[in-house]
Amino acid sequence: MVTIASVTPGSRADKAGIREGDILVAIGKNEIEDVLDYRFYLADTLVTLSCLRDGKPFDRATAKPPMIFDFRMFVSD
């Protein structure tokens, strides 16, 4: 599981509505279990992030910058 640790204010992630504490569960139809999955599946220029907030799922479509998504994350069980 990948949890969003922080979001850069004004970033694409921020504009897409991603918040600290959200849990990233998928990019497109690809399940995300760790940071390596995250990096691997960010090949497209437009991505849909599937997340959980307070146990409720939500999706956000956004364009991605070259290699990073303007948020820090950590992996938990």
Image: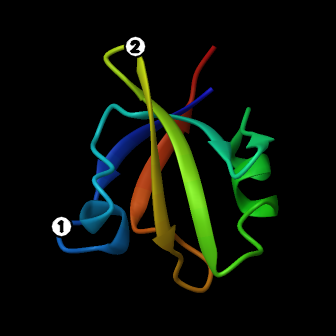
Q: Where residue 27 sits: x, y (%)? A: 67, 50
> Dot 2, crowdedness within 10 Å: few (<14), some or many (≥20)?
few
Residue at left offset 48%, top offset 62%: 61
Pick the quarter of the image with the C terminus. top right
Question: In front: 5, or 29?
Answer: 29
Q: Where residue 39 sits: x, y (%)? A: 73, 61
Residue that badge 1 annotates: 9
**As drawn, is 74 to the left or to the right of 30?**
left
Q: Which quadrant would residue 68 be assigned to in this image?
A: bottom right
Residue at left offset 78%, top offset 50%: 36
**As drawn, is 19 to the left or to the right of 22?**
left
Q: Is the C-beta separation of discs 2 and 1 under 8 Å?
A: no
**As drawn, is 44 to the left or to the right of 65?**
right
Residue at left offset 73%, top offset 76%: 44
Q: How many numbered circles are shown? A: 2
Disc 2 is placed on an element classified as loop
Disc 1 is placed on an element classified as loop
Separation of residues labelled 2 and 1 (CA atoms): 24 Å
Where 39 falls versus 67 (above or below)?
A: above
> Dot 1, crowdedness within 10 Å: few (<14), some or many (≥20)?
few
Q: Where residue 16 sits: x, y (%)? A: 33, 61
Residue flagged by tag 2: what amino acid is it?
Gly
Q: Where residue 2 sits: x, y (%)? A: 57, 34
Where 64 falls versus 21 (above or below)?
A: below
Q: Which quadrant would residue 54 be assigned to in this image?
A: top left
Looking at the rendered structure, which numbered label has been put on residue 17? none
Question: In front: 65, or 59?
Answer: 59
Looking at the rendered structure, which numbered label has been put on residue 55? 2
Pick the quarter of the image with the N terminus. top right
Residue flagged by tag 1: what amino acid is it?
Pro
Where 2 falls versus 72 (above or below)?
A: above
- Decide which of tag 2 and tag 1 comes sooner along the chain: 1
